[in-house]
């Protein structure tokens, strides 16, 4: 639950439409679903923003003894 709140706080701060942000979470994967117009903002220039999010998520996951993949997708209407 804490990881979900952490990711939501980061992505909501980046997205122009934070009310469209959805997070799916399981043991090995985090799915970030945003509006089509926000995908580029979440990925960032040269992928630096999503790389930073992945680093933070994996640092958190390693404290729990696991490794987590992160993907950004367009939210389906």
Image: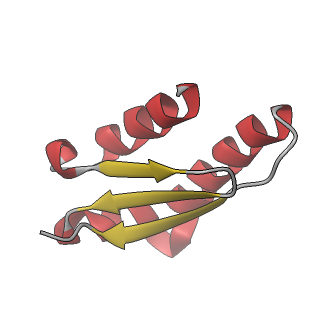
Residue 40 percent location from the top left of the image: 33, 70
The residue sitting at 33% across, 46% down in the picture is 14
Residue 66 percent location from the top left of the image: 82, 47
Residue at the extreme top of the image, as rendered:
2
The residue sitting at 57% across, 50% down in the picture is 53
The residue sitting at 18% across, 68% down in the picture is 37
The residue sitting at 70% across, 50% down in the picture is 55
Relative to 77, say whether 22 is above or below: above
Residue 60 percent location from the top left of the image: 72, 35
- Quadrant in the picture for the C terminus: bottom left
Asked if residue 44 shows in the view, the reply is no
**Horizontally, is 15 left or right of 47 in the view?**
left
Residue closer to the observer: 43 or 27: 27
Residue 75 percent location from the top left of the image: 24, 66
Relative to 22, say whether 13 is above or below: above
Residue at the extreme front of the image, as rendered:
26
């Amino acid at each position: 639950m804490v990881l979900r709140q952490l990711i939501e706080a980061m992505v909501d701060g980046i997205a122009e439409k934070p009310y469209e942000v959805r997070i799916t979470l399981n043991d090995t994967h985090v799915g970030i679903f945003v509006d089509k117009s926000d995908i580029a903002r979440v990925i960032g220039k040269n992928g630096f923003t999503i790389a930073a999010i992945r680093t933070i998520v994996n640092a958190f996951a390693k404290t729990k003894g696991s490794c987590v993949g992160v993907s950004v997708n367009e939210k389906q209407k």
